[in-house]
Structure formats: C-alpha cells, structure tokens
Amino acid sequence: MSEKRNFERIEGSLSGQFKIATLSGDFYETTAVNFSPEGICFYSNVKIEQEQEVNLIIQVAEERRVEIVGRVAWSDKKDGSGFYRVGLKLLETSAEDEAFFVAFYNDRMAHQQKPKKKVLVVDDEVDLAHLLSIHLSMAGYNVVTANDGEEGYFKYEQERPDLIILDLKMPKLNGFEVCRKIRREKKDTQIPIIMLTALQDDADRLIGKVVGAQRYMTKPFKMDDLLQEVEWLMPTDVFLPEE
C-alpha cells in the first residue's frame, strides 16, 4: 500500500485467514479485532516473530475479501489463553483491494457513533425539566436533570456536563448563586450557561450577564429557539493534526 498518515483504529470483528509468508503450509483461521488503512490487529494461535511478513485475507463484506501483505510490528500473548494479539503494519495489496478496503474503512468511520454531548437542566418546575429532557434527547444530547440549585451544583461537579440550562428562581440556591459558584469558586469560565426566568426586568438580565450566563431567555419560550441556542453554544471538539 502507498504511504499512509496516522488513522484512527476501528474496533471490529472480521473473520479471516493468515499464513507466514516465508513458510509453506496452510492458512490459519483468525479474527481481526481492529483495523485502519495502515494496520490491523488480529488473533493468532501460533507465535509470530516481529518483522516477519504475513499474508492476511480478511472478509470485509458478505462476498468480498481483501488480500494483504503486512509486517509484524508487535506480538503479545493474551493472558489466560493460548492466543497472541498481533499488530500488522500493512505493506502492499492490489490497487482494487486497497480501494475497497479504504472505502470500507471510511464507511465504518462515518457510521461509528460519536459520544453525545451532555446537557444539565436545572429547574424546579419538574414538568418543564422533563419536557426539556425529552426534546434535548430527541436532538441527540445526553441529559441530566436537577430540581433545585444545590442538586444542580452537585450534578455539575459530578457529571461534568458540556452545557447548563439553569432556571433563575429555585429553592436552596437560585440560578444566580449557582452560576456565581461555577464561575467564581470553580473558576470555570468555559462551560456555556443558558439562564431561564419568568422575570422581564432588564436589571435581572444585566445581573445574569455579570455572573456569567451566556444567554438569558424568558419563559414562556419557543422550544426551537432554545434548541437553537444550545446548538449554537455547545462546545465543539477540535482535533489538531499530528506533527
């Protein structure tokens, strides 16, 4: 295969066969347990030395196999079993098999589930918190709820959410107090906070901004507007290229 950059490995279970290229004899049955266009990890019931070349055939579709020649990068015996895990660096294959394998890898990557972002909803109106949880879950988020300020602050510390929807008027700790503890005591200035309240007073809006809320929405609000704010404020994962 042509030179590859570093690829993320995909966990999987692909049946196959292998043999040491320099030895005659039959192929051994195997299972590949993770793979990328630059390397494959598979099981072997025989020891294979580092740097040995291996012929590997793996089943990537119901009626499609790819044949690969690779060099052993490492080989470790699994604890409590007679099998070895073998890391194979891919060296060459036919252009047709390479194209099919790369396309197969890209398809699996596209369908691989990414971790969901987590939203903490803190509101003493239990029905509203439940309704928000339903709509946020349907939008693809993991949702944690709390029904007073103390519980909300505790779950902020324990759950490490990516974003908080915080009611203003609540028992034990109000929204301003929770927001202030997050910003000043925890010195967490990164997590987005959306403040919800029934108050219309502009002074309350100003206080909300001073204690660190990014958005201030008054009840009643349109659910689509809130979901749009969540999407807009939600931190995104940034992957920097390797040197």
Image (cartoon, rainbow, N blue to C red):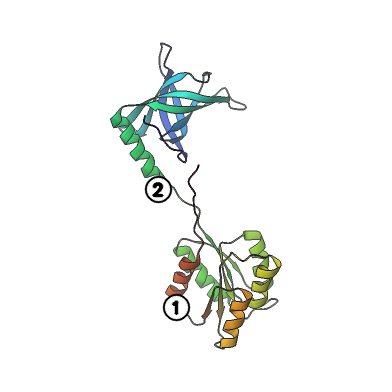
Residue closest to the eye, 9 or 3: 3
Is tag 2's residue or tag 1's residue first in the polypeptide sequence? Answer: 2
The residue carrying mark 1 is 222
Q: Which residue is mark 2?
A: 111
In the rendering, at what x and y percent does residue 81 appear? 59, 25
Q: Nearer the viewer, residue 115 or 81?
A: 115
User: How far from the left and from the top, in percent, is residue 32?
Assistant: 45, 31
**Relative height, residue 5 to residue 228 (above, below):** above
Q: Is residue 62 visible?
A: no
Q: Residue at x 68, y 78 (%)?
A: 171
Q: Residue most toward the left?
A: 96
Which secondary structure, mark 2?
A: helix
Depicted 187 relative to depicted 70: above or below: below
Q: What amino acid is found at the position of numbered circle 2 in the picture?
A: His
Quadrant of the image occupied by residue 65: top left
Residue drawn 44% across and 70% down?
228
Give the image location of residue 162, x and y in percent: 56, 62
Residue lying furthest bottom = 201
Task: Count residues near mark 2 (Cα–Cα under 10 Å), then give few for <14, some for 14-19, many for 20+.
Answer: few
- The amino acid marked with disc number 1 is Lys
> In front here: 172 or 87?
87
**Mark 1, other Cα within 10 Å: few <14 / some 14–19 / many ≥20:** few
For this view, does 223 lie left or right of residue 174?
left
Determine whether 11 is above or below 219 in the image.
above
How far across and down, in percent of the image, does residue 134 sit?
49, 67
Give left or right: position of 144 versus 20.
right
Residue 138, placed above or below residue 149? above
Q: CA distance from mark 2 to mark 1?
A: 32 Å
Image-quadrant location for residue 31: top left
Q: Quadrant of the N terminus?
A: top left
